[in-house]
Amino acid sequence: MPEDDARNGLRVGGWIPPYSPGGGPAGPIRPTAHAYANSPRPRDSFTRLRGEGTMRPRLVLAAALCLACAATAAIAVVLDASRSTEPVAAEFTVPVVPGQPIPAFPAPLDSEDVPVSVQPSPSGTVPPVPSTERPAVPPKSSPAATRTTTRPPAATRPAPPPPVRLSVGSTVGLEAADRPGHRVRHRDFRGRLEAVSASSSAGERADSGFRVRTGLGDDDCASLESVNFPGYYLRHRNFEIRLDRNDGSALFRQDATFCQVSIRQGTALALRSTNYPRHYVVADGDRLKITETTAAGATAFTPRNAL
């Protein structure tokens, strides 16, 4: 539509509102009354544009609130990270009093069921508890420790008697340990074990006496010489004990030598042949002979004084 007025006026969308009559160029611009002022209001064709103008400030306000919330959260995270870590739970100690039982603690509660907040102790230490411990008393010595023994010292105890032995140069009688009163004697030049006592005849007592000599066949052993037949010795011949004259032969010296073996804890002795080391003097009834046995199986003899 062509402009019919050259004045500078408002132009909206290429449309210039009509001016009221009588207005000059310098006068105020006044809109003229429309012909449809009293008629029904026509439909507004700019409703969409007005609605958009109303929502835009609201969107701006919501964006500003979101930015403010984000900034507040960021500041809170920074402050939380800068703070030092606080202790989760304070150390809690229970003083233990000697002589009293240790208090029992209740069973721990499930953290998911009951939330528990433990604050650290203001001072960090537990005040000391007055001690009720009694002063230590030295232990009493037991009666067994203080009791004096009545056993005499080892140095004053009587020593056990020495084992019986045949002493070289002595005159002895050999009594059977298991047959008291029975002694070794010679009769008819044979060795025998018979009862001989102080009431026996002089000949019988003399037949039971022997002088101990150094072993004719071994210096560590002994030989038994007859008291009433000097130069005659007990010897074994054909495994029998006999009384024979020393002929000076090596065989006689070996047959007439017997080694003493201590038995029965030294209270008796056994006679072992020197040239038959496994043979010992054994009483077979009233006869004496050598047989292969052990010292415990041999006849046990006890040296006695000659009658």
Image (cartoon, grey):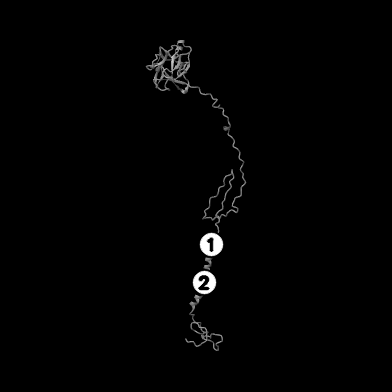
Check disc 2: other Cα within 10 Å, few if <14, some if 14-19, many if 20+: few
Kindly indicate whether the residue at mark 1 contacts the one at mark 2 (C-beta within 8 angstroms): no
The residue located at (53%, 66%) in the rendering is 71
Label 2 SS:
helix
Q: How many marks?
A: 2
Work out whether 253 lies above or below 25.
above
Q: Residue at x 52, y 71 (%)?
A: 60
Task: Looking at the picture, tell me which residue is in the foreground, 185 or 229.
Answer: 229
Q: Residue at x 53, y 62 (%)?
A: 78
| Residue for badge 2 | 60
The mark closer to the camera, 2 or 1, is 1
Q: Secondary structure at mark 1?
A: helix
Residue 179 position (above or below residue 29): above
Q: Give percent across and percent down for residue 301.
A: 45, 19
Do we see residue 49 in this rendering? yes
Q: Where is residue 305 shown, x and y percent of the image?
A: 48, 15
The amino acid type of the residue labelled 1 equals Val
Asked where in the image residue 183 lies, by quadrant, the reply is top left
Q: Which mark is residue 138?
A: none
The alpha-carbon separation of the residues under discs 2 and 1 comes to 27 Å
